[in-house]
Amino acid sequence: MSEPAPSVPRILEGKTGVILGVANKRSLAWGCARSLADAGMKLAFTYANERLKAAVDKLAEECPGSITLPCDVTQSDEVKAAFETIGNEFGGLDAMVHAIAFARREELQGNFFDTSKEGYMLAHEVSAYSLTAVTRAALPLMEGREGSIVTLSYLGADRVVPNYNVMGIAKAALEASVRYLAADVGPRSIRVNAISAGPIRTLSASGVKDFGTMLDRIAEKAPLRRNVTAEEVGDTCLFLVGPHSRGITGTTIFVDAGYHVMGL
């Protein structure tokens, strides 16, 4: 018989958090949710539209005490209502995980200079500005609680990744937002950090042309000679939310098997 999996220390017992961006069990947001829930955190999950509601509701059932609620981050009224509901249900908020990104499929192939203005603006609104919008909404719930905000980025924010195109520009804006927000909310005892995760087969990643080739190349070149998992990203999120990272803010941490250190 195999040994049972070691139990996870309940270092987040009595804490509350919200996860924005869970789509299915393969999503990075779900990896983060599992790590936080296993450590004792009570979670709220948001969904962007009714089409996603059933899937998010089903996943939330695996996290005791969790709630689900609508939150289309392009609609300011929905953002406001979502955080008012979280305040009513939880009383306060200790963590927020922003795992939201979107670009039109046609913008994730070919030349970046062919990006449409509409596609450019949409990618930035959903993938970058939304972090600022939800942080502003969360502040009254997080202030004075040693809170932590975590968002998800990718190497395409720093380097040219074929076909990543407008999403790379949006992720660069996201990482800059992390630094500015960290400076703004630090005096309120709130930290803001990003995880730059290596590519993982998720619903959003499937829109990037030749994604499978990207995975193979990284597994071949990364120092650890493999790709990373959503669970590894989730455990880094747990570190950034928990007390062991209490001195870290405004930082992007790479979880990519070391690929970002390689030249060729």
Image: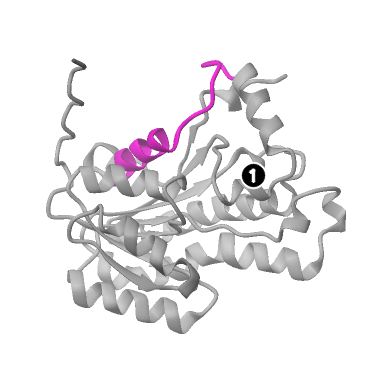
Residue drawn at (52%, 40%), measured in percent from left and top? 196
Residue drawn at (43%, 38%), measured in percent from left and top? 230
Number of other residues with Cα within 10 Å of mark 1, as a class: few under 14, some 14 to 19, many 20 or more: many
Residue farthest toward the bottom in the current orientation of the protein: 77
**Occupied quadrant, residue 58:** bottom left
Residue drawn at (39%, 80%), measured in percent from left and top? 80
- Tag 1: residue type? Ala
Numbered range of the magenta stretch: 222-241
Q: Quadrant of the C terminus?
A: top right
Q: Is residue 74 above or below residue 251?
A: below
Pick the residue in front: 231 or 156: 231
Image location (x, y in percent) of residue 126: 58, 65
Residue 153 visible in this rendered orientation of the protein: yes
75 left or right of 162? left
Pick the residue in front: 107 or 244: 107
Pick the residue in front: 244 or 87: 87
